[in-house]
Amino acid sequence: MDCRDIVEISANELPTLDTISQVVQDDGAGATTTFSGTTRDTFEDKAVIELEYEAYVPMAKKVLTELIREARNKWNLKHIAIYHRTGIVPVGKVSVVIATSSTHRVDSMDAARYLIDELKNRCPIWKREFPVFHSAPTWTLLERRFWSNVDGSFIFLGQFLARRFPSAAVVQFALI
């Protein structure tokens, strides 16, 4: 069976973990690893009722595809699936799922951890926390300092934000 790579970014509720596990299932795989990230009820010691995710989808898909390629170069993997939500994600609901399968557990587990860590570091996806009390929501950028342009070159974060939000007022961004 050929290797399957799936990248989905959607405003809809994500498929169940069982469904995604079946997507990466392979008779030659002795291990399937799934990671799911859910909205928790606090962020930096503040009560939260929901998160809102926004993504620069074309670039996010490109970055996720590149992460899959990197994972395949590091580990012996059968299938890989990455799903991420956009829009409002209430407390307790899943916002991201990563699933990998491989012949042996170490490859599958290490790859899943790598993929979620690198997604948070490099993928152009933002989340905004909505506090329970009446303080203003805060956007958090899920990346570090640079964005990769579609052509593979890099730009500074400020340049990217100015292009993405040309008419926006000043917004507080926190790098995580």
Image (cartoon, rainbow, N blue to C red):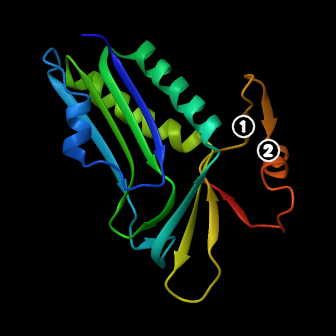
Considering the numbered disc 2 on the image, is that residue within a helix, a strand or a loop?
A: helix
Q: Residues within 10 Å of mark 2 (few under 14, many from 20)?
A: some
Query: Whole-percent x and y of residue 152?
Result: 72, 22
Screen quadrant of the N terminus: top left
Relative to 44, residue 17 above or below = above
Count the labels in the image. 2
Question: Closer to the camera, 56 or 67?
Answer: 56
Cβ atoms under marks 1 and 2 closer than 8 Å: yes
* Amino acid, disc 1: Trp
Considering the numbered disc 1 on the image, is that residue within a helix, a strand or a loop?
A: strand
Kindly indicate the quadrant of the structure image that contains residue 31.
top left
* Amino acid, disc 2: Phe
Q: Is residue 134 left or right of residue 91?
A: right
- The answer to whether residue 157 shows anywhere in this view is yes
Relative to 42, residue 20 above or below = above
Kindly indicate the quadrant of the structure image that contains residue 154.
top right
Relative to 33, residue 18 above or below = below
Q: Is residue 110 left or right of residue 115?
A: left
Q: Which mark is residue 147?
A: 1
Distance from the alpha carbon under mark 1 to that under mark 2: 7 Å
Query: Whole-percent x and y of residue 8?
Result: 45, 39
Q: Residues within 10 Å of mark 1 (few under 14, many from 20)?
A: many
Residue ID for mark 2: 160
